[in-house]
Amino acid sequence: MEKTFKVGTRQFHPDPNFNYQMNRWAAFGDLPEDAVRKAAAKITDINDWCREFLGLARDAESKGDVQRAAFYYRSVDFFLPYGHPEKMEIHDRTVALLRELHAPWFENRRIVESYVPYGQGRMPAWHAPANRAEKKGTILFTGGFDCIKEELVPVLLTFSDKGYDILYFEGPGQGETLAKEGIPMTPLWEKPVSAVLDHFGLSEVTIVGLSLGGYLAPRAAVFDKRIKRIVSWGIMYDFFDIAVSRRGPFLNALLRTLLFFRLSGVVNALVGWKMKRDPYMHWGVDHGMRVMGVASPYDYFREMKKYSLKALTGKVEQDVLLTTGTDDHFVPLSHYHRLSKGLVNAKSVTGRVFSSKESAENHCQFGNVPLTLEVIADWIDLQSAELPGRM
């Protein structure tokens, strides 16, 4: 598989959440636009989504097209509810095909797989050594709420080719650590990060956090000073505020009031009703309960409140890069400004707001991943020139 991404944001579907995910997989998986458009025309809800993309996945697999089959399956796995009888089968098929696709990178040792002990289980870690004679330093990469390591191989190789040792681990609530080890997510991200740094003997690193990793990475850096630089690739100032702010002012105020008075039964009934009518809310709550290891929507929203940087921004002391897009359908642009203004004790703060003219206006700038990686790498180059990492 080439280390390339499609550039551009396309209008596949009127629902912004569906449209974003279609663009995401088209960019990462090089999916044909005509096939995605035909599927989109038949999709009104999550059931339609899973049916259409599962058909495309099986067709691509029957033709031996591993790359497209892998990402079609990944799009099904993304939205398929955890209670579905085929959930784990489709998840495992997704991972297997992606690993087959990327097998050459493991065979030639461009990526080395290992495991880090954590609690009663373990966390997978992928190390992509610097692909240059002169190493620039070490990057610790952490994902967020829903990505898996197998889909991000080109990102790791890009940083490797730029001269960085890059280490990507799946922590609690993420990827293999959730699916195979059953370890739910923790807001105390310094714990898994410190375990990784200890295991590999790292002392000077840049941490890059993707999406919800925009909370996880700064949180870890506050409590582990071996982290010298922070990149929030898609900022995440306050997870709960972001989640409820997109549901309209009435539902926002109602949910906050019900949570304040601990009316769990009412919250569960209200959210359950809303999940039946809102496909993205259905996915978010269903997936979130699994990720965070809770049994009800009420418990999920209570847990979500812990993922906030409001009380931590003044404790960040490292160099910080924040990236966001002008039209992020999930994270309001106001959160970028609130976060940047709160970093009063950071060594330095650099912000980059991407626009539609750059095809990078969406969440995590997935419309133009190459540009985003270039901006991040250039910033790390400037900040870390005097502080090489060691691996």
Image: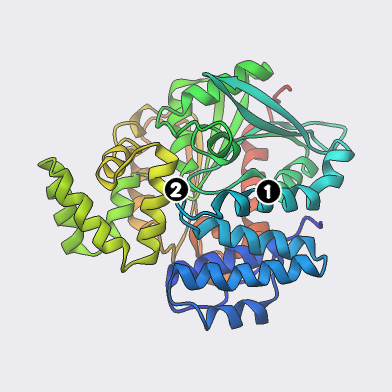
Does any portion of residue 252 appear in the rendered image?
A: yes
Mark 1 near mark 2, Cβ–Cβ under 8 Å? no
Reading the image, the residue beneath label 2 is: 235
- The image's mark for residue 22 is none
**Front residue of 278 and 365:** 278
Instruction: Write the residue at 40% across / 38% down.
Output: 292
- Give amino acid for label 2: Ile
* Furthest residue in direction left, as rendered: 261
Question: Disc 1 on helix, strand or loop?
Answer: helix
Does any portion of residue 317 appear in the rendered image?
A: no
The x and y percentages for residue 107 are 88, 39
The x and y percentages for residue 8 are 62, 71
Is residue 310 depicted above or below 85 in this figure?
above
Relative side of 261 to 310, left or right: left
The x and y percentages for residue 156 are 71, 43
* Furthest residue in direction front, as rendered: 85
Reading the image, the residue beneath label 1 is: 95
